Amino acid sequence: MKEQISINEIKGIRIGQTENAEAATGCTVFICEEGMCAGLDVRGGGPASRDSQLLNPLMAADRIHAVVLSGGSAFGLGAADGVQAYLEEKGIGFDVGVTKVPLVVQSDIFDLTVGDMKVRPDRAMGFEAARIAFESPNYRDGNYGGGTGATVGKYCGMDYCMKTGIGSYAVRIGELEVGAVVIVNALGDIFDHKTGKKVAGLLNEDKTGFRDTLGLMEKNIEVVENKFTGNTTIGIIVTNTAFDKSALCKIAGMAHDGMARSINPVHTSADGDSIYAVSLGDVSADRDVVGTLAAQVLSEAILSAVYSAESAYGFPSRKSIEAVS
């Protein structure tokens, strides 16, 4: 029987978050000190990422030590330097004789137009998030970590978008555990995958309800050179199974089905949609079952990111829209 669990119940991974709430940015770090097999699937046209080729099944590295989900767009990729520095101090990484080299991958959302664009996740913020992951793991949903500056519904620019954040969802079936953490920062609208009801997205003129992003796009098929390319939904699938990189890349790809069920439009050239999948244990499970569950938990995590977010920086949240309506 499937039961819901907390993402924090999945063993083998430490999660630390830090943010600059005033500047509206932050980072979320996932660390496995023994190393974890990982895969990646990128469907959006504008990703900001670091060392993603490590997760190509043809590359030599079979394990990584940390995944960083951050704000700051390409500027924020320096956060991984701090994570790497902390892990080296702890003696964690790939042994090269003279030291151990931690392998850290990262993906970022674009949040530069939300708060102070001059403040981005950096080495110091990454170091602190890694320290927190080890000393006092603090993951929670909402306006935290990499989701601090997340917004959605940006087809008409920032004047009519909504505040979202970071969200999680996990399940257990027998010994098998599968969970997702996602930062929802999409160009498109967000839907409840179970009902088809829109729950967040492009606001109407008085900001009391929604407009239809897809409908607006269909009214004008002329080429638009810049669709406000400040979007990206990024996430990670965490499971206690024993899969290699090839299988995890497939699971990450299947997890994108959950994104497609919940976001419309999705995977556009103005998004950088990226999903990691990591294997932390030795439980034997069918790859297709885990991939199907990954899509389900990702959809639920997207809802969590919407419903846990608080209004901030002048952008209303789902909670405030419900209060008005």
Image (cartoon, rainbow, N blue to C red):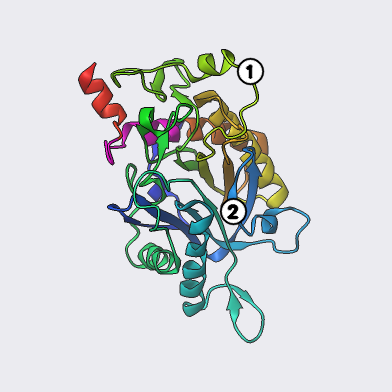
Q: Residue at x 34, y 48 (%)?
A: 115
Determine if residue 104 is in view.
yes
Type of residue at label 2? Ser
Q: Quadrant of the C terminus?
A: top left
Q: Amino acid at mark 1?
A: Ile
Q: Position of residue 32 (x, y in %)?
A: 51, 62
- The residue carrying mark 1 is 221
Residue closer to the observer: 262 or 123 = 123
Residue 227 rendering spot, x and y as whole percentages: 55, 32
User: Where residue 75 sits: x, y (%)?
Assistant: 50, 58
Left or right of residue 123: residue 20: left
Rendered residue at 58%/14% (across/down): 218
Closer to us: 106 or 66: 106
The mark that comes first in sequence, 2 or 1, is 2
Question: Does the stretch in magenta take in 313?
Answer: yes
Which of labels 2 and 1 is toward the front? 1
Above or below — where is 206 with respect to 292? Answer: above
Q: Secondary structure at mark 1?
A: loop
| Circle 2 residue | 49
The region drawn magenta spans 300-314
**Most foreground residue, 266 or 228:** 228
Residue drawn at (27%, 40%) of the image: 312
Does the rendering let one see residue 175?
A: no
Query: Label 1: few (<14), some or many (≥20) within 10 Å?
Result: few
In the image, residue 118 lies in the stretch drawn in magenta: no
- Name the outermost residue toward the bottom: 98
